[in-house]
Image (tube, helix red, strand yellow):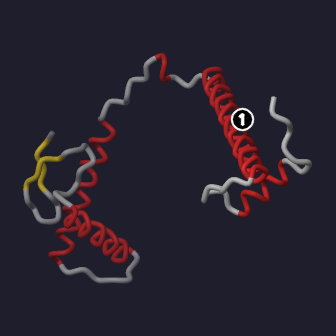
């Protein structure tokens, strides 16, 4: 993109984004600390050395350049299909709700089938699989209190 000078280490770097202010993570962390020091200096809680003040001024100038670049950046163009359409949002929400209802029904049917399988295994005296825990069997008995319905 564009070549810039890092306000912290004064090294040249190629900015990857419009908002890239420093050359890397280490300088970015130093910039954060410098900003908090500037804030404390402005509130009168701390004194800064002349070198630190100079670095702070470079950082503030770079911040201004970045904010100006953000303002000048053209706004993203919205296509017709990206414009907010409440009716389309409603259709998507309804379709999603329908899908969720179908999946809940499938899960309920699957669970009921497993309950029937567990009770059938118990009635036939078969060995139960390990995933059929006591809690699962209690739920199966609760789901079919009078026993299994006859096979059709």
Question: Residue under circle 1?
Answer: 105
Q: Does residue 128 appear to the left or right of 80 in the view shown?
A: right
Image quadrant holding the C terminus, namely top right
Residue found at the far left of this picture: 12
Where residue 115 sits in the image (x, y, percent)? 74, 47
Residue found at the far right of this picture: 146
Q: Nearer the viewer, residue 148 or 102?
A: 148
80 w.r.t. 143: above or below = above
76 w.r.t. 60: above or below = above
83 w.r.t. 6: above or below = above
Where residue 47 sits in the image (x, y, percent)? 28, 83
Disc 1 element = helix
Q: Nearer the viewer, residue 117 or 125?
A: 125
Question: How packed is label 1: few (under 14 Cα within 10 Å), some, or many (20 or more)?
Answer: few
Q: Does residue 97 appear to the left or right of 9 in the view shown?
A: right
Rendered residue at 11%/46% (across/down): 3
Where residue 110 sits in the image (x, y, percent)? 68, 40
Rendered residue at 29%/72% (across/down): 33
Q: Does residue 2 appear to the left or right of 74 in the view shown?
A: left
139 w.r.t. 42: above or below = above
Rendered residue at 15%/39% (across/down): 1
Where residue 27 sits in the image (x, y, percent)? 20, 65
- Which quadrant of the figure has residue 150? top right
- Which quadrant of the figure has residue 74? top left
Rendered residue at 30%/35% (across/down): 72
């Amino acid at each position: 993109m564009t070549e810039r000078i890092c306000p912290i280490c004064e090294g040249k770097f190629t900015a990857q984004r419009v908002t890239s202010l420093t050359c890397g993570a280490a300088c970015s962390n130093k910039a954060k600390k410098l900003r908090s020091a500037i804030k404390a200096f402005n509130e009168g809680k701390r004194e800064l050395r002349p070198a630190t003040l100079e670095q702070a001024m470079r950082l503030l100038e770079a911040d201004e350049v970045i904010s100006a670049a953000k303002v000048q950046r053209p706004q993203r163009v919205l296509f017709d299909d990206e414009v907010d359409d409440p009716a389309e949002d409603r259709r998507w929400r309804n379709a999603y709700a329908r899908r969720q209802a179908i999946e809940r029904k499938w899960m309920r049917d699957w669970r009921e089938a497993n309950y029937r399988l567990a009770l059938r295994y118990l009635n036939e005296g078969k060995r139960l699989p390990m995933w059929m825990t006591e809690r699962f069997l209690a739920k199966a008995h609760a789901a079919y209190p009078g026993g299994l319905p006859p096979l059709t």
